[in-house]
Image (cartoon, grey):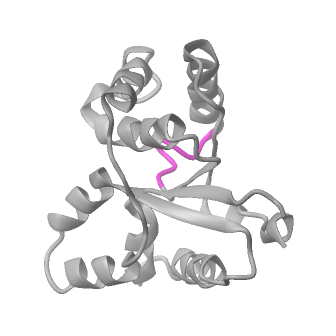
Amino acid sequence: MARKIRFYLDTSVPNHLFATDTPERMAATERFFSLLKDHARPCEAFISEMVVGEIARAPEPRRQALLEALRGFPVLDATAESIRLARDYTQAGIIPPRYEADAIHLAVAAAHGLDMVISWNFEHMVNTRTRRQVNAINDLKGFPRIEIVTPEEVNWDDFS
């Protein structure tokens, strides 16, 4: 049996389940969640305590809807190792220090050996520069490479 592909979802992904201002992204996110829950596919999705903390600051009723959408997803810790790796990303200028949470999302995924980060954050995460530089740091520090993609970019045929 094929190894499960392991996804990390940052907070932007469940938020787009309710993004009526961007209907294309909302539809792509709904499709992603639907395919993710298709048990025939060898994949697994994770969130982190960072995601849970960001959702906790959302207003009701959005907070409850987000928590419901993520019910049952394993929650990964931001370990000391992942915090150090996030700091490496910010010190290298990949992610501005002011947006350290974005660096932590990426570092948690790498430190836990996940395959892909799924995000709608184009400014700090889903772009060529970040992809290249995060993986350069991961190579240098002995962490696995990660793919950083949008829900639309996941090729589900790879997991059939």
Say left or right for 77 vs 124: left
Q: Can residue 124 be seen at all in this image of the molecule?
A: no
Decide whether residue 5 is among the magenta residues: no
Q: Residue at x 67, y 66 (%)?
A: 43
- Which span of residues is magenta-colored? 121-127
* Vertical position of residue 56 compared to residue 96: above or below: below
Say left or right for 9 vs 145: left
Q: Residue at x 40, y 76 (%)?
A: 72
Q: Quadrant location of residue 144?
A: top right
The mark tally for this picture is 0
Q: Quadrant location of residue 101?
A: top left
Residue extending farthest front: 1
Q: Can residue 81 be seen at all in this image of the molecule?
A: yes
Percent coordinates x, y for residue 129 in the rendering: 61, 30
Location of the C terminus by quadrant is bottom right
Q: Residue at x 46, y 66 (%)?
A: 13
Percent coordinates x, y for residue 76 in the rendering: 38, 51
Say left or right for 106 vs 71: right
Percent coordinates x, y for residue 30 in the rendering: 55, 83
* Vertical position of residue 4 compared to residue 60: above or below: above
* Vertical position of residue 101 compared to residue 61: above or below: above
